[in-house]
Amino acid sequence: MADDSGIVMDPRDNQGNLFTNFFGGVSTATGNAARFAQAASIGAVRGAGGVVGLFWRPAPVDSLITYQLDTELSELVDESKRENGRFSSEFANLSVRLAIFGYLEAGSYWQSAPRPIEGFSVTHPEHQSIGMLLASNKIPALFRGFSPKLIGPEYNRSLSRGKGRVSSGIIKEFETDTDLLVMHDVARETIYIIWQGTQSKVDGLNDVRFFPRFWPYRHQGGEKFYASRGFVRSHEAVINDLTAVVKEMWSTGKYKRIFTTGHSLGGILAHLNAHAMSYIMETELEATGLPLEERLVCYTIGSPKGMGWRLRNDYFKRVPHTYRMRNDEDIVARLPAPNRHHVGIPIIMDELRFIINYDETKGFTSDREKIGELVSDHGTANYLSNLLGLESRIRSTAAQSKALEDVFVSMTQLDQTYEWEVLTPTEKSKSVEIARFIKLPVTPVSLSPANSSRLKEAFGESVTIEVTTYLLYYASKLVETHDFRGGKKDDDGKPLQDVQEVSINIFREAFSELALDEDKEMNMEKIRYRIIFDRIDQDSDGLLTAGEFVRATSAMKGQAFSLETTNEELLEKLRAEFENVYALIEESYPGDPRLELTSVSFAEFFVWAKLTGYALSALQIAL
């Protein structure tokens, strides 16, 4: 079926496929494990794919935006000076943060204890955690968030297909378990569509349904396109209602650009959605007057392959401003898929390099058989640390960057004894010192006098005694500082010790935030409060129980704390403290009992202490 513009909008091809039904029916893998397992099953099919590849296909179409092969990024260009369609570090950084934000269901940016699915935000999206408020830049004096905001309840509706809802920009479809967010930034005239990655068994099944399915977005009479069946299924489950929301928003006259992003499964869905929007919103986008390279933008991380060859070619014509970022050893981005292709200008990165238009037939290292790195390199934390490291590295001179690297390397010598553990999780890290990690204790450890002198010589007076004393401690908490999550657990569900393994990129960014950034004084103050927090956190898991928190607040107020206090009484006291915090920032406290705060992360603790006026000296005296 076609609309008046001649664009084919047939929502889906419903014909079944014997092979798809068979593979989909017998697959029992969950989450990313399903896609990792795909690598093994693909081996048997790849030979057939090679035979199909012998048939004629059109010549490749490349992006309208051209880079020389293997262009290493050497400077960050101000947005006001960036040429149309050229790489934007601001867009890249934002896309990673939004992709992480998209994992609301897993607890990211949500609260210290992940909420149950039945109490997920689709039920009460207005009940926002401290983490979500911080991410949304509601308290900029304490934490830098990002400018896009979730759209309001005026766009709420039940989904026209399947089971699910649109609630304040959070879209949840339960049959395909498709999750995405719609956000906006009126100042930048942009609508953001963020697709969530694999989080469930249903997602995992869609990941491995790679047989072709008709992709319905094209001009009337144009050639037909195909994409992996599972990805098309997820996209089409929500596209009607997503389109309705975007068109309603666009009709207000406030927007000129659509920005799609996502991680992993969310990455390929963002690519597909960008292509779909290039047809669905074609008239509206052309009317903006913006060039083709700027009115529709897509940045993704860790995206798998998923498009047929002709669809790939059409994508490059219609969405040229697309950058597909990949960590060097990310397994998902490199999984084979017969006659499925990537789109976008490829970017590859590791500890030292950030290369645009990388030749993907090669890798930085030969360390491809180490499953630990293949899986960990797919994680959002690794992408965040590599991008943070890029920015801090480029902001420094060559001499300053080398000084930071020399200091880090001096802390990773395997023949030395330290107060921390040196980790060599990959083959590369066994011989390349800068690729190693250090795992610090919970308590602060200072830089050595020699290393402190190296940094002071390179950076001057910005390297204070406090910086050299707390740099490693701050680095060990850095990722949590950016994603507002405490209480991380291992694969068995046991709490992890509250320290982040420190890579060279984390080390670089921590130094930049403490010594060079505009917010360096606030970041140093966070350290002082963090030390107090760690003293209260008796099991060092990065969370305060209700008992730990109430005991500390009682001491600060000079009140007695009874060991006979019941759990219900502790939670009531905890609730009272944070109801006051929400009142101070004029936000509604989450009233649904299923969404109650039951433990306190550092971000929540810091906001509570600052907004309620508990000075650092009072906390120190009380504890």
Image (cartoon, helix red, strand yellow):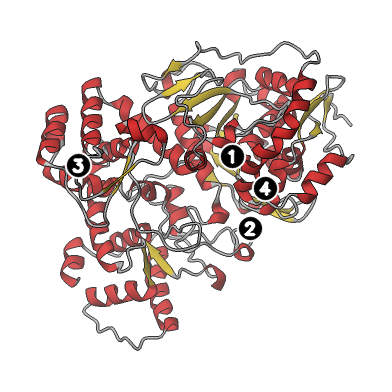
Mark 4: amino acid: Gly
* Circle 3 or circle 1, nearest the eye: 3
Q: Which of marks 4 and 2 is nearer the N terminus?
A: 2
Mark 3: amino acid: Gln
* Circle 4 or circle 2, nearest the eye: 4
**Above or below, 553 relative to 507:** below
Q: How far apart are marks 1 and 4 (CA)?
A: 11 Å
Name the residue tied to disc 3.
416
Name the residue tied to disc 4.
204
**How far from the left and from the top, in percent, is residue 16?**
88, 41
**How far from the left and from the top, in percent, is residue 384?**
43, 39
Task: Locate the N terminus by quadrant.
Answer: top right
**Above or below, 160 relative to 535:** above
| Observer-nearest of 209 and 63 | 209
Q: Which of marks 3 and 1 is nearer the N terminus?
A: 1
Name the residue tied to disc 1.
264
Mark 2: amino acid: Val
